[in-house]
Amino acid sequence: MGQIKVAIIIPSLSHGGAERVASSLANHWVKNEDLDVYVYNFSVLPKFYQLSTDVKYINFPISQKAGLFELIKLSLSIRRSIRKSGIHAVLSFMDKYNVFVRLITLGTGVRVTLSDRSNPFRPLGRGLKWLKRMTYPFADGVIAQTELAAGEIKRSTGARQIVVIPNPVRIPDGAMTEARERVLLSVGRLVAEKGHADLIRAFAIAGMSDWELFILGEGPLKHELQALADSLGVGRQVHFPGAMKDVHRWYGRASIFGFCSHSEGFPNALSEAMASGLPCVSYNCNAGPSELIEHQASGYLVPVGDIKGAAHWLKLLSLDRPLRTKVGGRARDAVRRLNPHAIAHKYLVACLGPELIVGLDR
């Protein structure tokens, strides 16, 4: 078999969960000498995640407010590039862009796999719902992040070739140590659906007077969240350092992870915290936390909106270091199955299918 060429198409490599996974997959795949790996973007945003120099990066920058003419031009540019490069298989990310990619690759003979990453019960407009029903069944494969999402995608789109592959997570060296600080950590964009306001309220109720809460992320609610913390009397304990590229250093510094998101496709930050040996208190939102955490074993799950329940488990952990170490160790063990090498291979098998994967040097 000759060189196999696979392309990942995603709007950008700016900060975000899908972008992190796309860059991780590309960097793992390109280590295989039998693969040529391409990444297509169409954004003016700077890259937050870096790609190996062996990955062929192609960007057709286009404004988010682009009109029909620009979209047609973009479609033709990507389609021509795919044909000229001799791409065999395409992996697309995120539902509305999946529709776009499936449409522009019609008639090319390229194998197309769609990675659907949003909350399976997120409200969609009628137009997008219709387009997903019209395009997903004609993809060569659809990748869901959770069993819950797979069932809903099948029901709402009629797609049949669905495989469940969770996001990869790196298991860092080391485990829970005595050097960890009295830090409650959370990671996520500063937007309402991430539930940071609930976490701040739970932190205040828990009375963790000798602890600090660090929330990593950027977003429009920073000043509102700081004002909330001030009003609850914990303003000096709550900090917003922004989005951090060295987020793993923060996981190593913290002693507890709080996650009060109201909606997820797959909770990357939660899985990363667990991989770092952090005991986690999480809302049991749709979708993902319950597929990662076994309640009162590898972490703690509370219903969405149960601020007092979250405060209870935060307080318990804050007062019991041996419990933090035990639960953190179990959390780490629970996500070992998500190591990047194994997940990257599962994605590759799904993208290439049985015909292309046969004979590939793995």
Image: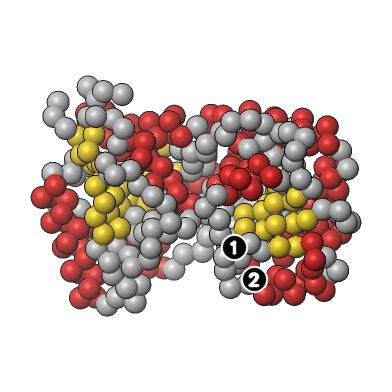
Q: Earlier in the sequence, mark 2 or mark 1?
A: 2
Q: Position of residue 148 (x, y in %)?
A: 54, 44
In the rendered image, the quadrant that contains the C terminus is: top left
Badge 1: residue crowd in 10 Å (few <14, some 14–19, many ≥20): some
- The residue tagged with tag 1: helix, strand or loop? loop
Closer to the camera in the image, 21 or 130: 21
Residue at image x 66%, y 64%?
Answer: 240
Q: Is residue 77 left or right of residue 232?
A: left
Residue 81 as seen in the image, left or right of residue 300: left
Tell me the mark number nearer the camera, choosing from 2 and 1: 1
**Residue assigned mark 1:** 242
Q: How many marks?
A: 2
Q: Where is 288 relative to 323, above or below?
A: below
Across and down, in percent, residue 242 comes to: 59, 62
Residue 225 seen in render: yes
Residue 209 in the image, given as x and y percentages of width and height: 88, 56
Gap between marks 2 and 1 measured at Cα: 9 Å
Residue hosting label 2: 222
For the N terminus, which image quadrant? top left
Determine the secondary structure under disc 2: helix
Question: Where residue 31 appears, x then y in whole percent?
Answer: 31, 32
Identify the amino acid type marked 2.
Lys
Q: Amino acid at mark 1?
A: Gly
Crowd band around label 2 with a 10 angstrom C-alpha radius: few (<14), some (14–19), many (20+): some
